[in-house]
Image (cartoon, rainbow, N blue to C red):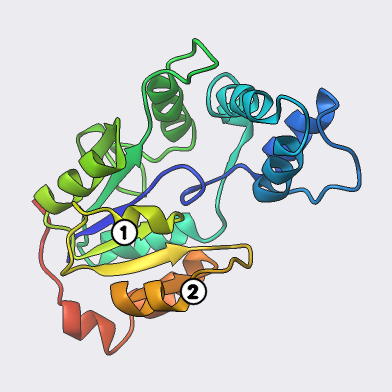
Amino acid sequence: MILGSDFDNTMVDYNALFYQAALGIGLVDGSVAANKTAVRDHIRKSDGGEILWQKLQAEVYGPRINEAVLFLGLCDFLTLCIKNKIPVYVVSHKTRFACRGDVDLREAALSFMEKNDLFNSSPYGLSLERVFFVDSRYEKGEIIKSLNCDVFVDDLIEVFCESSFPADISKFMFAPQVIETPLEVDSLLEIEMVKTWDELSEIIFAEPFISTVGLKDGK
């Protein structure tokens, strides 16, 4: 089995950081829920909201990224992947620079990974060679296909809907918050929703999934 995962909002939890960053500059108040979606929706309703939101994203994903945290359960999941000889690849739709910022977002993401001990001799088995940043969702689908991933985890349904996304792959949508997804899309693409990495572990490392997909040594 080869597993791929998105990075932002799938491996990395920015909810508290988005709220604190927006609160600090007066873009939200205590009436707004402390999660990314609520913060985004509130800001976008204000005058010039889209530009303000873009600037906040550039700040959070760039210079303040090390204030974010890994989602609970991720490290245990990666440890189980190592135990079962399942290689994990990170494929992220992330441009090098935000449209409203000048910090290298890819370097910032790699710095976050290193700070959180995800690389090389760490117990979690990721490496620079298994991290891919792309400029578009189409390119993301192509990379996932080229890696021969059997499983992919992402927080955006648009990724699974992309024409380049491989059809013969197990799709898991990471959705910690309750979201509304058209049922016909779920059915057509055979997307399974999970709220936590622990929930995903219970599926991936249990029967019948592990027998159906199979285990194979990574490269």
Q: Nearer the viewer, mark 2 or mark 1?
A: 1
Q: Is residue 160 above or below residue 194?
A: above
Residue at the limit of the structure toward the top, as seen here: 102
- Left or right of 192 in this view: 28: right
Tell me the kind of residue under disc 2. Answer: Glu
Please provide percent x and percent y for residue 46.
78, 33
Q: Secondary structure at mark 1?
A: helix
127 and 197: which is toward the camera: 197
Number of other residues with Cα within 10 Å of mark 1, as a class: few under 14, some 14 to 19, many 20 or more: some
List the residue tagged with mark 1.
161
Please provide percent x and percent y for residue 34.
77, 48
Q: How many marks?
A: 2
107 and 179: which is toward the camera: 179
Of pointers 2 and 1, the one earlier in the residue sequence: 1
Tell me the kind of residue under disc 1. Answer: Cys
Report which quarter residue 19 is drawn in: top right
Q: Residue at x 19, y 85 (%)?
A: 211
Please provide percent x and percent y for residue 54.
59, 26
137 and 108: which is toward the camera: 137
Q: Secondary structure at mark 2?
A: helix
Which numbered disc covers residue 199?
2
Which numbered disc covers residue 151?
none
Q: Residue at x 55, y 53 (%)?
A: 71
Report which quarter residue 106 is drawn in: top left
Q: Are marks 2 and 1 in contact (CB under 8 Å)?
A: no
**Quadrant where the N terminus is found in the figure:** bottom left
Please provide percent x and percent y for residue 105.
44, 22
Q: Residue at x 20, y 68 (%)?
A: 169
